């Protein structure tokens, strides 16, 4: 099993508009889990934490989501979701209008991103 967090960006149509998504996913060994659900039948468990946004700030969201995903997995108990609730509240209250363009567009190769979205 990998202990690295990987990310994916995606776009979903929603009522004539678009939702922009960031997914951080990770895999851990099932034997390492503090609580193993009955439906876990393989040697590894892969889960993802996703954020859907009305604004395409992929890099900013990934920058904030990646450490939260890592901390969520390090708990080794997926029943403990308060960390995710706290992250949602913090992200919902983030003053995007006060952030610089560099912060909003952090870490994104825009040409590659839009080329990928077009295809």
Image (spheres, rainbow, N blue to C red):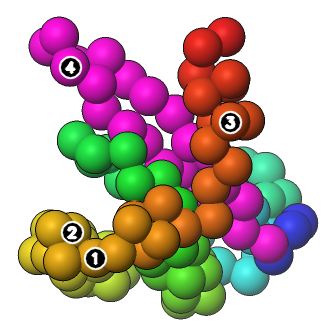
Q: Of helix, strand and loop, which one carries label 2?
A: helix
Rendered residue at 17%/10% (across/down) = 16
Observer able to see residue 53: yes
Tell me: residue 119, above or below residue 68.
above
The image shows residue 4, relative to residue 119, as above or below, that is below
Residue 35 is situated, as x and y percent measured from the top left of the image, at: 53, 77
Indicate the quadrant containing the C terminus: top left, top right, bottom left or bottom right. Answer: top right
Residue shown at 34% from the left, 75% from the top = 100
Mark positioned earlier in the residue sequence (2 or 4): 4
Question: Circle 1: is it few (<14), some (14-19), or many (20+) Cα within 10 Å?
Answer: few
Residue 17 is marked as 4
Check residue 111 in the rendering and tell me which mark sits there, or answer none: 3
Residue at the extreme front: 101
Question: Callout 3: 10 Å neighbours few (<14), some, many (20+)?
Answer: few
Q: Percent from the top left, x then y, of residue 103?
A: 43, 74
Decide whether the magenta segment is chiefly helix, strand or loop. strand
Magenta stretch bounds: 4-24
């Amino acid at each position: 099993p990998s202990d690295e967090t990987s990310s994916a960006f995606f776009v979903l149509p929603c009522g004539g508009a678009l939702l922009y998504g960031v997914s951080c996913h990770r895999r851990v060994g099932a034997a390492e889990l503090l609580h193993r659900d009955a439906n876990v039948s393989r040697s590894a468990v892969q889960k993802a934490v996703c954020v859907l946004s009305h604004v395409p700030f992929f890099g900013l969201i990934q920058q904030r989501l990646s450490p939260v995903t890592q901390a969520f997995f390090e708990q080794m108990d997926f029943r403990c979701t308060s960390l995710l609730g706290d992250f949602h509240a913090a992200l919902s209250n983030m003053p995007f209008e006060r952030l610089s363009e560099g912060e909003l567009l952090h870490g994104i190769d825009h040409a590659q991103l839009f080329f990928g979205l077009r295809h």
